[in-house]
Image (cartoon, grey):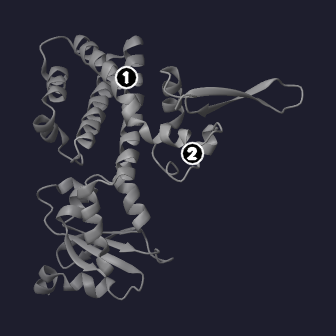
Amino acid sequence: MRRLDERGLFYTDLFGRDEDLIGLLLIKNPYAYPTLIDGMDKLVMAVYEHLPGEAAEAEHWMWEDTRIQVRRVTPAKLDAWIVRGEYRGIIHCLGQGEVLYDRDGYLERTRRRLGEWPADMKEQKLLCEFSRYLRTYFQAKQDLKDGQIMDAYTHILASLNYWAHIALIEDGMHPEPTVWGQIRRVNPGIYKLYEELTSSQETLEQRVHLVLLAVEFSVLTKMKSSCALLTRILGGSQQSWSISELQRHPELEGLALDLSLVLQKLAMRGYIREVAKPVRQKGVHLLELRYAALLNE
């Protein structure tokens, strides 16, 4: 039985009977990143064209003395994990996992896409990370104004983390779970701010103030490039868009995105136009805010 486990035959026999199975991936060495599989001994990721109706997306199994986490996904769900960062360590799993089954070379193509960073996926990832960057920055700023220093510290540290993600993506890299070791090699400037925030001899409030100023400048300089997907969508039509129409756009739908905040800040910086249109409502003079590309673009 142990030999079956080592060769992956146990898993291919269990899942190989499923007609909709596209790919089967095994992570069998949890020691490098034990938190990625929630303390289990092994992770099996099964990719299906369509998830079987009775199948659970996540299961925990026990086989002899081995605890196994099972994840069932569709290609669309897998792409969402990659773009949104919902499943921590998905890039590592796809890159380092042992391929047990790969119908029509799906997993191989996915690995190749990760290496090539397709433009559409990169734009979506940048927009998601910038949205989180913007939100945590504004939250830290408000916390500091309210005198909530520890909360401000927590949020500005998170903001630095998203800034690091943006820098890595711009450099053609995927952020890893150990992002600070990665950013130290790629962008020492951001790492220096991380050190200033976490280990400087100044007071906590002074440290937060210092890093907040750097983050504020970075937010302004990164805004246009990080939001290229959104400005491109707006520029693709002569009509203005409501926020609900943008949320339903195929390239934005389902993204973990604080769209309201991003649109407001883009409009305030003059990167997009805010258009107010009357709403037909009896007895009420109401205007709907809509968004459009700049007239000269």
Which element carries disc 1, helix, strand or loop?
helix
Q: Position of residue 262 (x, y in %)?
A: 48, 31
Q: CA distance from mark 1 to mark 2?
A: 24 Å
Position of 181 with respect to 21 (left or right) is left
How many marks the image carries: the answer is 2
Mark 1 vs 2, N-terminal side: 1
Query: Which of the 4 quarters of the picture holds residue 26?
Result: bottom left
Q: Position of residue 45 (x, y in %)?
A: 30, 70
Image depth: mark 1 or mark 2 in front: 1
The one nearer the camera, 64 or 90, is: 90
State the residue at coordinates (49%, 51%): 251
**Residue 86: in sight, yes or no?**
no
State the residue at coordinates (16%, 20%): 196
The one nearer the camera, 192 or 116, is: 116
Which element carries disc 2, helix, strand or loop?
helix
* Mark 1, residue position: 220
Within-10-Å neighbours for mark 2: few <14, some 14–19, many 20+:
some
**Residue 252: in sight, yes or no?**
yes
Position of 206 with respect to 152 (left or right) is left
Name the amino acid, label 2: Gln
State the residue at coordinates (50%, 30%): 261
For the N terminus, which image quadrant? bottom left
Most extreme residue toward the front is: 296
Position of 150 with respect to 294 (left or right) is left
Q: Position of residue 285 (x, y in %)?
A: 82, 23
The one nearer the camera, 196 or 233, is: 233
State the residue at coordinates (22%, 41%): 171
Name the amino acid, label 1: Leu
